[in-house]
Amino acid sequence: MRASFFRYQAIGVVHSPFKSPEEIPVERNASPGGFDDVRGEIEIDPDFAAGLKDIDGFSHLFVLFAFHRTTASKLQAKPPFDTEVRGIFATRSPHRPNALGLTIVKLEGRKGRILRVSGLDMIEGTPILDIKPYTERDRKEAFRTGRRAKS
C-alpha cells in the first residue's frame, strides 16, 4: 500500500467553553448525550460563508475537525471508563494516525457566518475542516455500540 498525503484548509473555528482538553470532564464521555447541554459557536471563515446557504433547514450537523492539540499518534488506547486497551479505530481517542475528529452537533441558530450549536465536545480554537447536514439517510435502525470479542 502506498502512502498518500493530503493537505486541508480549515473552513472555520470553534468557540467553546472548554479552553483545553483537560477542561473537558471525562465523565461526559461515559453517557449518551453527555455533551447535549454544552453550547458554543462555529465561526466560518468569510471565504466559505456562501457555503452556509440553506444550512438553517437542518437540525443537526456532522462536523469534521482537526485534533489540533494532539501530540502523539497511538494504535491502541484505553477509553475512559473501560478496563481494556482497545485498537484506536474502536475508540474516540484524539491520538489517531490522522488527527481527525467527527462529531454531531445540534444547530440552535445562525447569524451570518456564526453557527450557534449544542452538543459541543471540542475545545476553543479547534479548526473545522468540513460540515455536512445530518439527514434521514444517516439514521440507522439497528446498530451495535459495545465491544465484540477480541480479534
Image: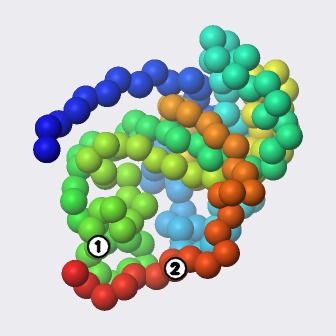
Percent x, y of residue 38: 70, 54
In the image, farthest residue toward the top: 47
For the N terminus, the image quarter is top left
For the C terminus, the image quarter is bottom left
Percent x, y of residue 126: 51, 35
Quick check: 146 above or below 45?
below
Q: Quadrant of residue 34?
A: bottom right
Kind of element beneath mark 1: strand
Quick check: 1 above or below 50?
below
Percent x, y of residue 81: 43, 79
Q: Which residue is mark 2?
A: 144
Mark 2 neighbour class, 10 Å CA radius: few under 14, some 14 to 19, many 20 or more? few
Question: What residue lies at 38% left-to-right and 52% top-to-bottom?
Answer: 94
Q: Is 92 placed left or right of 27 in the picture?
A: left
Quick check: 50 above or below 64?
above
Q: Give the residue type that dot 2 points to.
A: Arg
Q: Is 74 placed left or right of 135 in the picture?
A: left
Question: What residue lies at 64% left-to-right and 69% top-to-bottom?
Answer: 140
Q: Give the residue type that dot 1 points to.
A: Arg
Mark 1 neighbour class, 10 Å CA radius: few under 14, some 14 to 19, many 20 or more? some
Q: Report the label total.
A: 2
Viewer-proximal residue among 4 and 98? 4
Return the mark for residue 86.
Answer: 1
In the image, farthest residue toward the bottom: 149
Question: What residue lies at 70% left-to-right and 50% top-to-bottom?
Answer: 134
Kind of element beneath mark 2: loop
